[in-house]
Structures are given as structure tokens and as C-alpha cells.
Amino acid sequence: MARAVFILWTFCVILGSANVGQAAIGVNWGTQASHPLLPSTVVGMLKDNAIKKVKLFDADPWTVSSLAGTGIEVMLGIPNNQLKDLAKSYGNAKDWVKKNVTKHLSDTGGVNIRYVAVGNEPFLKSYNGTHDKTTFPALKNIHKALNEAGHGDKIKVTIPLNADVYDSQSDKPSGGDFRKDIRDLMVQIVSFLNENKAPFLVNIYPFLSLYSNAGFPMDFAFFDGGHPIQDKNVQYTNVFDANFDTLVWTLKKNGFENLEIIVGEVGWPTDGDKNANIKLAKRFYDGLLKKLGSKKGTPLRPGTMEVYLFGLLDEDIKSVAPGGFERHWGIFRYDGQPKFAIDFTSQGHETMPIGAKGVQYMDSQWCVYKGDHVLKEASVVAPEIDYACSNSDCTSLGYGSACNDLTANGNISYAFNMYFQMQDQSVEACKFNGLAEIVQQNASTGHCLFPIQIVSAGERIGLASGARLFAGLVLSFFVLV
Ligand SMILES: *[C@@H]1O[C@H](CO)[C@@H](O)[C@H](O)[C@H]1NC(C)=O
Ligand SMILES: *[C@@H]1O[C@H](CO)[C@@H](O)[C@H](O)[C@H]1NC(C)=O
Ligand SMILES: *[C@@H]1O[C@H](CO)[C@@H](O)[C@H](O)[C@H]1NC(C)=O
Ligand SMILES: *[C@@H]1O[C@H](CO)[C@@H](O)[C@H](O)[C@H]1NC(C)=O
């Protein structure tokens, strides 16, 4: 017994010391997927890869409860469409806290909830001010409700903000200030965060800087030098630091020099654009994680940075309004399998991360175009492709994407297969006016994967409870006999 205790103690000491000095790296776990993995499977991935912080976009009870007892720090999210209700009535906020926070807490083995993120980039320019009046009142109501429930010391409120809430007159960090149309509001919010020792949460996307400016110097998006810019006596070698310090300047100018900043989202997509691929994503993460491990911070904020990577998994039903890359931000694929080696410890231990375990795939069959020999009129095929793609995900066909070099027939097959898989391989979903057929031969070519969908979380539960019911019936049969 004493020996067991000693071993356990040594183990904890070793584990503890391994943690000392590690950068605080978390991941974003989004669930806008047609076939989401089981929450318990995803939690297994987090544990296997020693990821200790997770940011969610809602407070789905199945997801949240699956984190119970893991010790993983959790940031709950409140979607923008709930802001109005939470702003309107304190009772609604109280109810939200009771149902989505208090329920999951317990002294032993509860969920380690640390933050509630109110809204998601609610002041994005493209929202035209839709959430300007509701976000701050919702924040205050949730904060008050957390306090009243006795959670205020441990659980902080904040708002995940896009870096477009500030800009720079001079195009240099030192010219930073809040965007004019929301300046007063931002000052009030920042003052509230400051009073309540809550962090400023900002999403910074070097990929989008590159994507949206044709003249953007490529190297400046990464962390391996090149194209430095000079700002007063500071030199910036990457846009991440420059952007972060623009925020530091912005806060300083408004009197909040010491407000804590957490990066809520940063990452690089692997498909759906000419600069979205595994090679560049790996280059980005290699540089970012090395930087985080070094604790250099930024020129104006040296030291440890707290960062949530975006994101954990590909999400095939995200809106592609920003671009086809939106569905390919995952460090892991749709099925929880890793795409590239990465160093989550940021201590120079780069390895292929551990993929999801126990994932169930559907049958190895594909839906393909059978018109190889018959030249079909484009007018016959085009509407079928349109239908298939608008009800599935064809973003890998786009310019510069993994499947952009398919033949014309390959394109059609890709679209048909994506729809077929999305529809759980239903025979009805491989008709396309007689143009399609189901085959057992792998239709993937070169870099282009024709995926087989996974059995989605909801259905597996259905199957599992069906099996339990069956076992129960068999059991009661024997008991009755
Ligand atoms: C959170 O609480 C509200 C009720 O206050 C409820 O409507 C909602 O479904 C809960 N769960 C989520 C995921 O927001
Ligand atoms: C914002 O305004 C633009 C231009 O008027 C419009 O196209 C867009 O749909 C609006 N967005 C929202 C979220 O209202
Ligand atoms: C396949 O489809 C993509 C995207 O629609 C297009 O860019 C490409 O030119 C097509 N290829 C052929 C050979 O038709
Ligand atoms: C189909 O082939 C691709 C490689 O071309 C491979 O990655 C994939 O695992 C294969 N799928 C199945 C179900 O065997």
C-alpha cells in the first residue's frame, strides 16, 4: 500500500513537473458537422493528446457533460442568436446559468468550467451592427447570474471578438485603436472586463490577412522570418505579433494597458483555397507552437501567451460565405484522424497526434458517375451536380484545392459521392436521373480523397440503445422461461 502510494506520488510529481513551463494551449471544438463524432470520442482525443483546455461554441449538454471529471478547462459559448433573449431579461440569464453551468458543477468530478464566452464575434463588420445593442447587456446579465449563483470567482465572462474590432490608422501596431463605429461600446466593455478581472478574447487570423490582400507578403503570415516591418523602435517579423500588439496599443490608448488578452482562435486551414494546404498549415503551426513554447510572447507583451487553436475538427456544414476553406480548419479530419504532425506540448516534441479511437465508418462504397462512355449534355449533368454540391460539401473541388485536378467525369463523381455519403449512403441518394451508380472500388485519386462517411453520433446512440433493447429482450425471455 505504502509502495503504491509512493509510486502514485512519484507519478504525480513527474506529471506535475512536465506541466511546468508548458504554454497554455487549448483548442476550439466546433460541431457544425453533418456526422459529428461522439462527444466521448472527442474527449478521448483531447486526453490522448494531453490537451488541457477547450473552447466550445455553445453549451450542448451532451458535449459539456462528456467533459466531466476530466479536469480539462472549459470555455462555454453562447451563440449570437441567444444574445437578444439574454439581454432582454435577467431571468433568462439566470435560467441559462442554472441549466448550462450550475448543473454541470460539483465538488467532485464536475465539469471544470472556467469561462463563458458571450456571443461569437458579434461586432463583425458584416453583421451591420445587428448585435451592437444586445451583446453588452447579455454579458452583464450572465456575469451577474454567475455571481449570484456563487461561481463568479472561478468562472469569468468574456466576448470572443474578431480582430476587426480594432484597426490602425498608420497600418502599424502603434496606430491601433478601436473601430470608430463601436469605439464607445468597446471602451465600456473593456472597462467592465477590467473591473471584473476578465480577459479580452481576440481571434487573429494570419491566413485571412493573406487571403484577403493580394499584395500581402506571404512570409509575414508565418513565423520563420522575412519582410520585417519597423514600428518606432520595434521590429515585427510576423503579422500575428503585429496584430496582437495593435490590440495592446489599442487597450493602452484607452487606459487599459494591463488587461489580460487571450487568443480565442488562431490556425490555418488545409483545403479550399490555393494557400490552404497541409504543407502551409504545418509551417504555420510549427512556427506558432515553437513561439508559444519559447514564452517570448510579443514585443509589447513578453511572456506566456494563452491561445486556443482553431480548430480541432473539420466541419462540413459551416457556412462557406467567407470562402471554401471554412470547412477545412481542422487539425484533425472529419473522422478525427490527424492530418499532419504537430507539437501540442510546444516543447519540441513534434509527433503525429493520436486520432479518434473506435470510429465506425459506413460501408466501403462510393457513388460515381457512370457516363464514362456516353457523352451527356452539360445541361443534363449540370443541374445534378448543382443539386449534389449544394446539399453536401464540394469545397475540395475549388481552385487550388485538393481535388481541383480531377477530370470532368471525376468532378461529377466527386459531387455525387459527397451527396451520397452525406445522405448516409442511401440507395435513393445515388440516382441522379440514372447518371450514377454505387461501386465498391475506391474512387479516390492522387491527392483527392473520396471519403467514406462515419456513422454519426446520433445514429450510433440509436443503434446502441437498439442493441441494448434487444439484449434486454433476450434476457427477459430467459428469465421468463
Ligand atoms: C441553456 O439554457 C437555456 C435555458 O435558459 C436553454 O434554452 C438552452 O437549451 C440551454 N442549452 C444550450 C445549449 O444553450
Ligand atoms: C449587411 O448589409 C449588407 C449590405 O447592405 C447585406 O448584403 C448583408 O446581407 C447584411 N448582413 C446582415 C447580417 O444583415
Ligand atoms: C472540375 O470542377 C472544378 C470546380 O467546379 C473546376 O474548376 C474544374 O475546371 C473542373 N474540371 C474539369 C476538367 O471540368
Ligand atoms: C481510398 O483510397 C485512399 C487513397 O487513395 C485512402 O486514403 C482511403 O483510405 C481509401 N478508402 C478506403 C475506404 O479504403
Image (tube, helix red, strand yellow):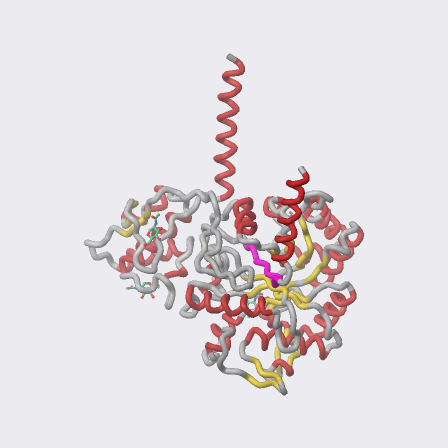
Q: Is residue 161 visible?
A: no
Which of these two is toward me, 411 or 402? 402
Residue 231 horizontal/vertical position (percent):
60, 85
Look at 19% across and 54% down and name the residue there.
373
The overriding secondary structure of the stretch rendered in magenta is strand
Q: Is residue 167 visible?
A: yes
Which of these two is toward me, 284 or 267? 284
Residue 23 horizontal/vertical position (percent):
61, 63
Q: Residue furthest left?
A: 373
Look at 50% across and 25% down and name the residue there.
471
Instruction: Using residue 198 as the reference point, say whether residue 464 is left or right of it.
Output: left
Look at 50% across and 82% down and name the residue there.
227
Look at 66% across and 58% down and name the residue there.
117
Which of these two is toward me, 149 or 181? 149
Residue 143 horizontal/vertical position (percent):
75, 57
Q: Is residue 28 magenta?
A: yes
Q: Is residue 261 above or below residue 317?
A: below
Position of the N terminus, as image quadrant, is: top right
Q: Residue furthest front?
A: 3
Q: Residue furthest bottom?
A: 232
Instruction: Using residue 180 as the reference point, say whether residue 475 is left or right of it.
Output: left
Instruction: Using residue 402 as the reference point, say whether residue 352 is left or right of it.
Output: right
Magenta region: which residues? 22-30
Q: Quadrant of residue 152?
A: bottom right
Q: Is residue 215 above or below residue 314?
A: below
